[in-house]
Image: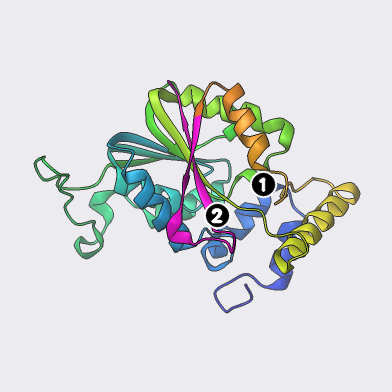
Amino acid sequence: MFTEQGPTVRELAVQALSSIEHGYDLLAPKFDHTPYRTPDRVLDAVTDEVRRLGPFGTGLDVCCGTGAGVGVLRQLCRERVVGVDFSAGMLAEARAAFPPEGERPAAERPAAVEPAGEAPVAEGPAVDWVRADARSLPFAPAFDLALSFGAFGHFLPAERFGLFAEVYGSLRPGGQFVFPIGAPPPVGSRAYWSLLGFDAAMRVRNALWRPRFVMYYRTFRLGDVLEDLTRAGFVVRLLPLTDLGRRPDGSPRARLVVATRE
């Protein structure tokens, strides 16, 4: 966290006392050098699992941040990929990471992709960026695949159904909404107390300071999530992300939620 590339303690303190939107605007230039950025091994595990569910034409990264999920979608979708976020700073970083094809040096352009049984494709899908609140997505049913990484802690439990309904309305019939969800840490473990302490500190901060900064790690419980997805109209199944390992009891450390609009 406190490397030369990452944010300083002072910068994190200023961010933590800001609103979610302004806080991420401030953090954006150094976000990819923090633990908040989804690790590559998680991105790779999700990519490998979702590839088996395709093919996909169009993809949507919900709360895209600096674009890690867009990088996944570019490997999975053939036609168009859209990243949506409400932080202008995060979108600016994402645009810089994925400039239009004509603005990238040839050595940095993606290699030709050749789907099985089809003619080679010269370049990846078109990438667009949209600034919008995920609780009010500005899309018609246009996407075959939607995904999200690491954003759900920024939504209160009461907002979750509405968020899922917005994603549902952005998908074509048969479209799929996917995201990883980790197993809860064992009660009494170091990770358990760390998450509990972080959430407690955040609740105290929000009780004493405005604007609020919603970031709760323990409110996104699997049972509640499945219920809200079903209420929103999705048919849901869970797939183990075995590449991320198993717990001592043999259960997966993480699962992929696959919610389908039928």
Q: Residue furthest right?
A: 208
Q: How is the image coloured?
A: rainbow
Q: Which is nearer the eye, 113 or 221?
A: 221
Q: Which residue is mark 1?
A: 153
- Classify mark 2: helix, strand or loop: loop
Point 80% across, 45% down: residue: 211
Q: Which is nearer the eye, 4 or 198?
A: 198
Disc 2 and disc 1: Cα gap in Å?
A: 24 Å
Q: Is residue 47 above or below residue 234?
A: below
The quadrant the C terminus occupies is top left
Query: Residue 198, how many percent across, how many down?
Result: 77, 59
Q: Which is nearer the eye, 134 or 54?
A: 54
Point 88% across, 53% down: residue: 204
Q: Which residue is mark 2?
A: 251
Q: Which residues are magenta?
A: 236-262
Q: Answer with left or right where residue 107 lies relative to residue 11.
A: left
Q: Callout 2, which amino acid?
A: Ser
The quadrant the N terminus occupies is bottom right
